[in-house]
Every structure is written in structure tokens, then in C-alpha cells.
Amino acid sequence: MPKKFETIFNEWVLLSVNVAIILATELSGQYFARTGIIHIIAIVFVILGISRIFIHYDAYDRYLRPLIRGGSVALVTFAASHLVEILGYMYFKATVDAIFINVVNFYIMSMLIVAIGAEYFLRALKREGMTKIIVLGAAVAVFSLLTILIFMNRISVSLEPGGSVPYIYSLLVVASSIFSINRLFNVKRRVSIMAGFINYFIAAFVLITISALQYVLYDVLPGLGIPGFQILYVSHFLFYGALTLIFLAFVRLSDLGGVYQETQKTG
């Protein structure tokens, strides 16, 4: 069943779908933004992404299991970011700035969750303490709490160019991305058999970073002559692409074999 599923939703099919969506959206002018179709398409990708966690692979190595599980949790967290966006509009009646910041909170959490999984593996390899994992876990907890407080209107946020929030969040996004990608590179260097899985995640994190910056700089970019609806479109295109890459990453877990033996040789 997993093989059939992956044959249907292979790289070329998903690439074609992404390209078709981009063309249809851009040719519509502002229609997809005005009618909310751009958000409906996001739900389709959310369902596609979450479907991946129901396909289990038996080749999990116990030392890499936290990274793989972290990838699964990150996939759900990242996918949920746009459910949060829709709920922000429809249920919480939050401001656009609050919704965008909370979407970015989920983006950051998804990257840090993968970094935690990578740290578990690196810690076992280097016999290090739990300090980094605790700090990363605390960071995820802080961003989760921020999301709740912002939606409850306990914290007011503004993405106005004259304020500090867009620039602070830009730094947080870039720092989280660089750190998480660095952790993945460290795992990849030690376990080359995981390269396919990790490469997809690294590419996805690049797209996530650019998408997040579109959100936090939403009020800044129009000053450069970029229309608001195009910022919305590009951020969503990048979301679709990133979720597609994470979805495809798990295909690379099909035939890992004895990963830990290689780890011992290269560690």
C-alpha cells in the first residue's frame, strides 16, 4: 500500500501539481487572494502532509529514531500552521499581524523540533549532556505559549515597518533555520545513508525560511513595490513546496537498513 501511495504521489506528479497551482494562481490576478482559494489549496497540502505519518517504515534505527520522529512531528506542526491561519481568520477574528506572527511561530517550532531530534542522535554519538535539547525544548514551549497568548489577545503584535517586531522575528527565523540546518548537516556527515531524507528537509527549511520572512515583512515589502497579494501568493507557494519536500523526505526511509553500523564506522 505505501509503495502504491508513493507511486501515485511521486516527485514528478507533485512538481507538476505545484507548477500548475502557481500558474493558475498568477493568471487569476488577485482572485485567489480575494476569494480565499489560496487558503483552500493549503488545506489540500495539509492533508497530503499529514497522511504521511500513517505510513510506517520498519527500518528505523534506534539512534536515529528521535530524528525521524522529530521529522514526523515537525511535518504535522508545519502543516498545522495554515490551519492556525484559517482559524485565526474564521474563529479567533484576530488581526492579520497576529495571524501571520502565529503562522511564523509554527514555522519556527517545526524547524526546532527537527533540531531536537538531530541533537538526540548527536548527543548519543558524542556522549554529551542534555543542555542543548532542554534549551531547544524550552524554545518550542515559549513559541507555543506565545501563539496562545497572541490569539487570546494577551499580547499585542504589530508588523508595522516602524516597529521592532518584524526585524526581531526575521532574526529569529534565520537563526532557527541556520541552527536546524547545521544540526542536519552534522547528522548527514556522520550517516551518509540518511542523506536523501536530510537533503529534502534542508531544502524544505530554506523554503520555510523564505516563506516566514514573507509573513514577518508583510508590511515592509510593499515599500519595495511588491503588491500585498503577491506576498501572500509567494508565501503560500513556498509553503506548498516545503510541505511537498517534507512529504517526499519520508520516501527515503524505505530502505535504510542497518544505519547504526555505519554510524559506528563513521563516528
Image (cartoon, rainbow, N blue to C red):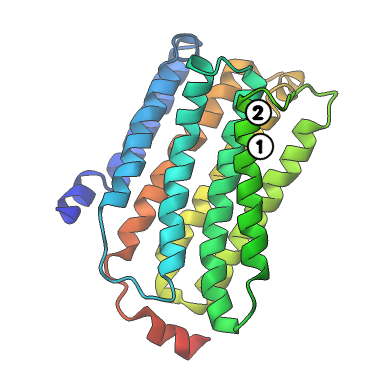
The residue carrying mark 2 is 150
Q: Quadrant of residue 40?
A: top left
Q: Quadrant of residue 123?
A: bottom right
Image position of 166 with respect to 121: above or below: above
Q: Residue at x 36, y 48 (%)?
A: 247
Q: Judge left or right: residue 139 versus residue 255.
A: right
Pinpoint residue 87: horizontal percent, then vertical percent: 48, 22
Callout 1: helix, strand or loop?
helix
Q: Judge left or right: residue 88 versus residue 17.
A: right
The answer to whether the residue labelled 2 contacts the one labelled 1, judged by CB atoms less than 8 Å apart, is yes
Pinpoint residue 3: horizontal percent, then vertical percent: 18, 55
Q: Which residue occupies the foreground of this view, 199 or 159?
A: 159
The residue carrying mark 1 is 146
Q: Which residue occupies the foreground of this view, 142 or 126?
A: 142
What number is the disc on residue 232?
none
Pinpoint residue 80: horizontal percent, then vertical percent: 45, 36
Q: Judge left or right: residue 255 versus residue 90.
A: left
Image position of 83 with respect to 201: above or below: above
